[in-house]
Amino acid sequence: ITANMVIKVFVATSSGSTAIKKKQQEVVGFLEANKIDFQQMDIAGDEDNRKWMRENVPGEKKPQNGIPLPPQIFNEERYCG
């Protein structure tokens, strides 16, 4: 990872799902523990973030219903998981 690349973690800050919250905490905790800079992008309060995340997760990585759930990780525009 070069200095000018930005890791973006798409999360839902107001998710009612315990499983989603746990996964988000694990991802954010891992990045913080390894001192990896990242931007947290909230999809719960920002329709543009939600739309961008859903459009940029590759088709083969989307769940059967076609709607990817957070957390989703990107390096700039490149999908990471």
Image: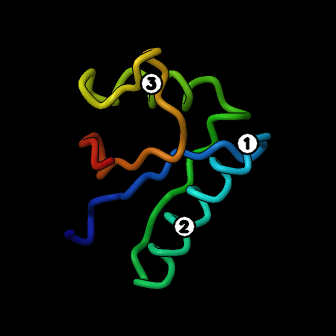
Q: CA distance from mark 2 to mark 3?
A: 21 Å
Closer to the chain start, of discs 3 and 1, is 1
Q: Which residue is mark 1?
A: 17
Q: Which mark is residue 54?
A: 3
Judged from the image, the secondary structure of the residue bearing numbered disc 2 is helix
Amino acid type for the residue under numbered disc 2: Glu
> Cα distance, mark 3 to mark 1?
18 Å
Q: Secondary structure at mark 1?
A: loop
Q: Are marks 1 and 2 in contact (CB under 8 Å)?
A: no
Q: Nearer the N terminus, badge 1 or badge 2? A: 1
Residue with the most extreme left position: 2
Residue closest to the eye, 18 or 49: 18
Q: Is residue 8 above or below residue 16?
A: below
Q: Quadrant of residue 4?
A: bottom left
Q: Is residue 31 left or right of residue 1?
A: right
- Kindly identify the amino acid type of the residue bearing the numbered disc 3: Arg
